[in-house]
């Protein structure tokens, strides 16, 4: 099936022929739907903290930080911003010249409110000989958009989201990268050091490095901290082969096999390379200006406090089990902790002898742990918190996407549609065991939870394979706890006009 050139390509990527063959089998067989117990809800898989409990968890986190632990803020930032401007690209190609759709009218009607206005106005004056207002008055709307999107202008259509001007401050603006630097100083610093890791694309890495080098002194002085910023790129070994509609390998016009990035699930390899006790994970575009950061900072600390409190208890119980000095009553306490606090239940354990029960409990306690913030569902597209069955018969908390749910099962569809909460990608992760050794995160991936989607290349249809999502199947076998956080902590920017929302002004 594979030529010598194919094998050389595999070798250059660090992928074996067996892996490629396995991926082609995935195209043929598809991925199984998950078996659901229920949509998670408050009192059934989601923890809701009152003010006193929040204060207690914030205190727990502050005390933990004071111990000098290694803490990292991990920000997936490799995505290009092109999808943000889909409607504006369509306007440039449209058969009309003046704003016609509601989106176009909203964009031009509030163009002065964008943080990038001054920069765009300057480039319009340079390239067109006049500013935005004059171009609009002359009806040259498309010239404004081209100066925003194209390489001769600001090139926003090709830049990564992290480097776009999002927010306006007195006399300056901030990009998402800068907002994450500020956030890091407010809740993730340890020993006066704020460690932040960005995953970036190879083509944009130099731009990120240049921006960060320019702004770090400003924020180090403002917050009295030292930043340690690192970056990584998605590994070529996590690319996946593309397939034809008949599931045979897709080749380009020159007969070369086509590989595609494996999706955000590929970043489990990048996360696995982080040496830290606690890691915060948050998407690049979910940031807000300083005036409304208080909720974000508070609840990041709450999530982290819940995590370290649960981890301490899990470690204590593990040490008791390892010592062999425990009573049946102690086992009952540990069972209640695993079931109630770690949200992992298995009805079959009541039939286990104590020796087998101890093995089961050790396995459940000795694994990576994450606490995930979830917000009330307001109709945003994406995944939600569920209680699902695992291969060992246990039921645990998982974040699911709609594609993982059997649409022919009306009960499951109702669970998804009527779910009370939504996943905003707001995670705090514990990556080391009770002995201080790093977990090998690749061991906890459910490989049967990938995704297959339809794409095209040069006008030809192809099938693309995405690896189990970073916060979905890639963390399937972690201990997962859901905590409700306010909607004010979730302000993603999916289109350029989202920057006109009050939260980003």
Image: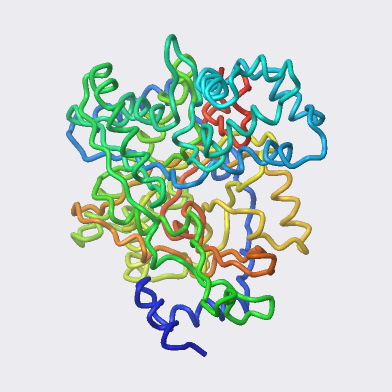
Q: How many numbered marks, from 0 up?
A: 0
* Residue at figure coordinates x 42%, y 15% from the top left: 172
- Residue at 63 percent of width and 73 percent of height: 30
Residue 258, x across and y down, in percent: 53, 71
Colour convention: rainbow
47 vs 178, left or right, is: right
Q: In the image, 321: left or right of 84?
A: left
Image spot of residue 377 (x, y percent) = 66, 36
- Percent position of residue 198, x then y: 36, 43
Which residue does the image show at 40% across and 83% down from the upper left?
A: 7
Quarter of the figure with the C terminus: top right
- Give left or right: position of 231 versus 166: left
Write down the quadrant of residue 437 in the picture.
Answer: bottom left
Q: Quadrant of residue 135?
A: top right
Q: Residue furthest top?
A: 170
Residue 135 versus residue 368 in the image, above or below: above
Within the image, what quadrant is residue 10 found in?
bottom left
Residue at point 29%, 40% (across, down) = 72
Residue sitting at the far front: 129
Where residue 130 appears, as percent x and y from the top left, is: 60, 17
- Against 338, residue 142 (above or below) is above
Q: Nearer the viewer, residue 453 or 274?
A: 453
Q: Nearer the viewer, residue 98 or 369?
A: 98
Is residue 254 toward the left or the right of residue 16 in the image? Answer: right
């Amino acid at each position: 099936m594979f030529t010598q050139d194919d094998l050389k390509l595999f070798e250059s990527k660090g992928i074996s022929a067996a892996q490629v063959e396995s991926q082609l089998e995935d195209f043929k067989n598809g991925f199984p739907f998950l078996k659901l117990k229920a949509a998670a809800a408050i009192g059934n898989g989601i923890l809701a903290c009152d003010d006193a409990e929040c204060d207690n968890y914030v205190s727990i986190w502050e005390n933990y930080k004071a111990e000098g632990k290694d803490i990292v803020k991990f920000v997936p930032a490799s995505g290009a911003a092109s999808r943000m401007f889909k409607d504006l690209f369509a306007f440039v190609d449209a058969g009309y010249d003046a704003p016609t759709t509601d989106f176009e009218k909203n964009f031009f009607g509030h163009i002065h409110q964008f943080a990038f206005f001054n920069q765009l106005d300057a480039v319009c004056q340079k390239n067109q000989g006049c500013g935005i207002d004059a171009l609009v008055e002359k009806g040259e709307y498309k010239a404004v958009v081209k100066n925003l999107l194209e390489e001769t202008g600001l090139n926003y259509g090709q830049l990564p989201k992290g480097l776009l001007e999002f927010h306006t401050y007195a006399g300056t603006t901030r990009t998402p990268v800068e907002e994450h630097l500020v956030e890091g100083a407010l809740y993730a610093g340890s020993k006066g050091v704020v460690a932040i890791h960005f995953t970036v694309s190879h083509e944009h890495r130099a731009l990120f490095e240049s921006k960060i080098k320019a702004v770090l002194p400003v924020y180090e002085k403002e917050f009295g901290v030292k930043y340690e910023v690192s970056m990584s790129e998605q590994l070529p070994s996590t690319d996946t082969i593309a397939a034809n509609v008949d599931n045979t390998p897709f080749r380009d016009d020159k007969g070369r096999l086509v590989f595609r990035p494996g999706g955000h699930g590929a970043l489990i390899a990048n996360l696995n390379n982080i040496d830290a006790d606690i890691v915060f994970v948050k998407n690049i575009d979910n940031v807000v200006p300083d005036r409304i950061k208080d909720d974000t900072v508070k609840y990041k600390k709450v999530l982290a406090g819940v995590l370290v409190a649960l981890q301490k208890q899990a470690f204590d119980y593990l040490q008791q089990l390892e010592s062999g000095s425990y009573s049946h009553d102690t086992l009952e306490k540990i069972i209640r902790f695993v079931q109630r606090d770690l949200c992992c239940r298995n009805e079959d354990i009541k039939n286990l002898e104590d020796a087998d029960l101890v093995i089961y409990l050790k396995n459940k306690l000795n694994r990576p742990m994450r606490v995930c913030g979830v917000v009330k569902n307001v109709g945003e597209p994406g995944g939600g918190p569920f209680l699902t069955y695992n291969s060992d018969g246990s039921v645990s908390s998982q974040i699911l996407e709609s594609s993982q749910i059997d649409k022919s099962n009306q009960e499951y569809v109702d669970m998804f549609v009527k779910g009370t909460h939504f996943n905003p990608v707001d995670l705090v992760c514990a990556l080391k065991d009770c002995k201080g050794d790093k977990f090998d995160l690749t061991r906890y991936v459910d490989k049967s939870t990938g995704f297959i989607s339809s794409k095209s290349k040069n006008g030809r249809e192809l099938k693309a394979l995405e690896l189990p999502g970073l916060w979905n199947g890639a963390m399937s076998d972690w201990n997962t706890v859901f905590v409700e956080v306010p909607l004010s902590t979730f302000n993603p920017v999916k289109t350029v006009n989202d920057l006109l929302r009050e939260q980003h002004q």
